[in-house]
Image: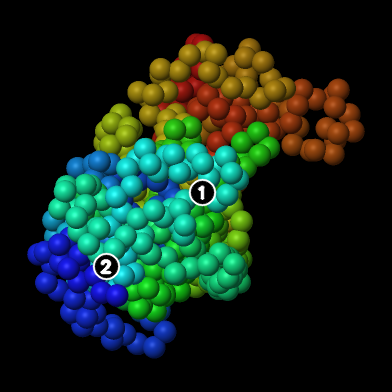
Amino acid sequence: MSFEKLAELIFPNIDKTPEYYIEKYPKRELKEGAVVTRYAPSPTGFQHIGGVFAALINERLASQSEGIFYLRIEDTDQKREVEGAIEDTIKTMHKFGMDFNEGMIGENTEKGSYGPYRQSQRAEIYKSFAKDLIKKGLAYPCFATPEELNELREKQIAEKITPGYYGEYAKYRNLSEEESIEKINNGVPYIIRIKSPGNIENRVEFHDLIKGDISFPESNQDIVIIKGDGLPTYHFAHAIDDALMRTTHVIRGEEWLSSLPIHVQLFEILGFEAPNYAHIPTIMKLDGGSKRKLSKRKDAESAVSYYDEEGYPMVSVIEYLLNIINSTFEEWRAENPKADYHEFLVVLDKMSKSGALFDIVKLNDVSKDVISRMTAEEVYSHYINWAKEYDKEMYELSIANEKMVKEIFNIERECAKPRKDFAKWSDVRGKIFFFFDELFDKEKAHDVELSKNVDLSEAKRIIEAYAKAYSFNTDKETWFNELKAVGAELGYTSDRKAFKKNPEEFKGMVADVAASVRSALAHRTNTPDLYTIMQIMGEDKVRSRFEKFLNI
Ligand code: GLU
């Protein structure tokens, strides 16, 4: 049976056929094994870390195989759209080292010959396919009102049968062409559904590149393909876009896995070959012993802006996500400490099938490693870029004391076991503030940390003696001998064994003397190498700190 007239009535202005588009967007000429992937966000404005995670997998796979990674904007739900969201997505991905070969490159600009890459501008394409399906009797206008659908649902639930619009419950699937035409001419509102040929008794076998072999019952639901506003549903747009844009691998969140029966069927009805699918596990977090989804409302770390504000280098976040994608990344990184992360090969079937666990402590460790591999110059440049936006005071101080700040960043860096003290740029202030009188002088007496074996008056006694003995222009060894000599005079030994044997004979160890010098210079007992700190501060500052300490 043909539904030519009905199709014409519904889509009078559509004069293109599926063949036209299939020819217009031919198979891509890429080298053997090249993968075509896409990032396909809805432009809602909120950049979720899960989006970066999904984009990264897509980008890596395309780029590793010298394929194509493109940006498609899924804006068929126009109520949720936020202005500027496309630019924001592109900027965010760029910041994370991901650039698109094709697709949207701005709010209103795109590149590539498989566009438009914005679904709202593809209405004509979807309609051409819908028109063709109607003609062939594979899709139909459905006139069910929301009340009718509700009633059907309640009845199905009460009778304990699978809810939905299908088979005998699909009241409008078998209307004659004349009946449908009459309703449309009478102005009855409708949407377009497919006439599903599926039978739930049949099982479909499927291979997912992450989840492995799966099977599910065939879909028998007459799903909606074109909504009342003339735009397609996600399902329909997905099938048409990924077919016409010649996507080879659809890599997307596992929340879509349950829709796979529908998608497989749509590809079949449309006469397209289905792409490869990989369903990525959802990013979870441990909360009081149980796993849950990272929540936009509850978890600051779900927003991409969080990493900016805290000052995580973007490479740290990416390396951390690579760790989640393939647990072999860590080993690879240990073996290739200097390599660029792009050299690591992402493999889908090595990915965990269940939830990906997001763990800030692990992120911090990864980030400390990343920062420890940077030169002092790099640290400085990253830091001032961050501070310019998020810590004006530190920014001004760092710019005004560039040489000193670089020296500070150079402490125990570029050596076999570099210091791993910063996980993020917001950690820097707390670790280097004491070099700046402006910040140091704001500290209160109760901020001063002391060695646990030494009280304030004893620490002052140590500093008083040390200030007299201390000479600035010495090498490290002489400096340390001096410190030991001052300690010995006051009853602090450098002989650990002797101390262990007869602790009552000593006040403490030379470490307590060094800790007291740290207290005086930094108000902290745990700092990087003390000799270097004193060299960076210079004699005047060191002496003035001793003075200040004695007057606390
Ligand atoms: N727009 C869909 C989403 O944001 C894309 C899913 C897909 O990659 O196909 O969930």
Residue at (28, 31) in percent of width and height:
392
Image colouring: rainbow
Front one among 386 and 526: 386
Q: Position of residue 149 (x, y in %)?
A: 40, 43
Q: Amino acid at mark 2?
A: Ile
Residue 551 in view (yes/no): yes
Q: Which mark is residue 163?
A: 1
Front one among 341 and 105: 105
Q: Write down the residue under mark 2.
A: 134
- Element under disc 1: loop
Residue at (59, 29) in percent of width and height:
525
The extreme right residue here reads 501
Quarter assignment of residue 384: top left
Q: Amino acid at mark 1?
A: Pro
Q: Taking 481 as reference, is 436 left or right?
A: left
Q: Dot 2: within a 10 Å radius of its alpha carbon, few (fewer than 14), some, or many (20 or more) residues?
A: many
Quarter assignment of residue 20: bottom left
The reply to whether the residue tagged 2 has its Cβ within 8 angstroms of ligand 1 is no
Quarter of the picture containing the N terminus is: bottom left
Front one among 487 and 251: 251
Disc 1 from disc 2: Cα separation? 25 Å
Vertical arrangement, residue 452 with respect to residue 312, above or below: above
Q: How many marks?
A: 2
- Element under disc 2: helix
Q: Earlier in the sequence, mark 1 or mark 2?
A: 2
